[in-house]
Amino acid sequence: MLQRGRGGATRRLRALRLLVIWTVAAACGAGGSSDRDAEVQEVQWQILGSGAVYAQCQRLPQEPRWTVEADLRLGSVEGPGEAVFSEIRGVEVDARGRLLVLDHKASTVRVFDSDGRFLEIVASPGEGPGAISRANGIRLDSEGALWIHDYGRLRFTRLLPDGDVETYPLFVQGFELLWEGGITTDGRLWSPSAHAGQEAGALEPGVSRREKHVYYKSLDPVSGALDSILIGVSPYHSIVTDRGMIEVPYSPSLLHALDPAGFIWTALSDEYLLTRQTTRGDTVLVIAAGCEAPLLTREERRQVIERVERLVGGTGSVQVDWDSFLPDHRPVLEQLVVDDHGRIWVVRATADAHVLDVFDSRGRFLGTIEPGFDFAENFPPIVRDDRLYVLQVDSLDVPFVVRAPLPAIE
């Protein structure tokens, strides 16, 4: 298996930051109007010798900005209906606007029409070729086939539109809450994999500041060929006890999203710096924008410290200097999502809500979406056919899929 240089992705970003930028005055958006002259920001553009583009906006623009409201909420608190979900681990939308919802605990993939009416179950527990167990992700490919990341059976299950079923072995075996991989238009499967070096049992109790090397590994289902690329290096701040390892809340992490066209977007969560690279590891675009991260309130800090101390309490082996170890702000970025037009959506944290900034594949800022509803932070939104789909979880931990139509974004 081919693995690129371990520090290559980090060195590329550092080099890009150090280069002298020549500037071109431009709006940090899709063009302006006389009403928005005060909001026009200068973008610094640089064409690197490699052909990569560096776009820097000193301050993220406040316009254009849209508020969107839900037109569908799929789910139910109780009842015998198929819209009662226990734990949603995947949502997809097909070319006809039908919703496919993966329920992890029930091991089912259910299909609903665009009005939320139940149509059928296309995958369920059992022993047949299409049966699934403990699946934690679904994706549709360019042929309309549904891929199911079936961790319980250590395989991918591919459901073709004509009813045929294909299966392939999982090539990355580590378990995550959600499968964050996907399928590129050339038919290759991609899954992320992180390596932090020493295992928890090999570390001395105490606070630990390490790094994880994050890879995207790929499988060609036809030939069986495997490959991998290093996409970045992520900080990994944790507390090690004789009971195990606990990651420090609000620590920075490496976000990533696969573009089926053959690109990977990455960003560290504590810095508004997006990188677009090819699946061969070549950086083609970097977007930097000035944006303040929301501060942690006293109450948020208190709750985090109490929760972690309950988990590590009773061992007497770890003392934590929280003033130096816990960040004073929340990560500014929370998710990266690529839509069906190749645009990148950035879920950004503000002091009192979450918003979504949108850029096209060339780095042009298109605007910010403010959802008029809350949504789960750890579940990536989906944007298909100019509609936004998010996961909501109520106070009883009942999950819902929420849809909102989007404005024309150009």
Image: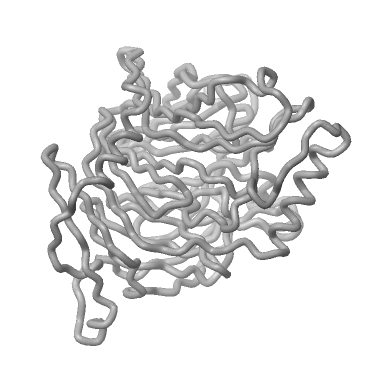
Q: Considering depth in this image, is 177 or 98 the residue closer to the camera?
A: 177
Tell me if 40 is positioned left or right of 254 in this view. left
Tell me if 259 is positioned left or right of 34 in this view. right
Q: Position of residue 180 (x, y in %)?
A: 47, 37
Q: In which quadrant will I find the N terminus?
A: top left
Tell me if 268 is positioned left or right of 112 in this view. left
Residue 215 placement: quadrant = top left
Q: Considering depth in this image, is 211 or 333 the residue closer to the camera?
A: 211
Q: Residue at x 70, y 64 (%)?
A: 298
The image shows residue 152, relative to residue 24, as above or below, that is above
Residue 394 placement: quadrant = bottom right
Q: Position of residue 273 (x, y in %)?
A: 36, 51
Q: Considering depth in this image, is 212 or 366 the residue closer to the camera?
A: 212
Q: In which quadrant will I find the C terminus?
A: bottom left
Q: Considering depth in this image, is 174 or 150 the residue closer to the camera?
A: 174
Q: Is residue 260 visible?
A: no
Q: Residue at x 40, y 45 (%)?
A: 267
Spot the residue most to the bottom. 35
Q: Residue at x 37, y 51 (%)?
A: 96
Q: Position of residue 7 (x, y in %)?
A: 36, 27
Q: Residue at x 42, y 41 (%)?
A: 256
Tell me if 58 is positioned left or right of 75 in this view. left
Q: Is residue 143 visible?
A: yes
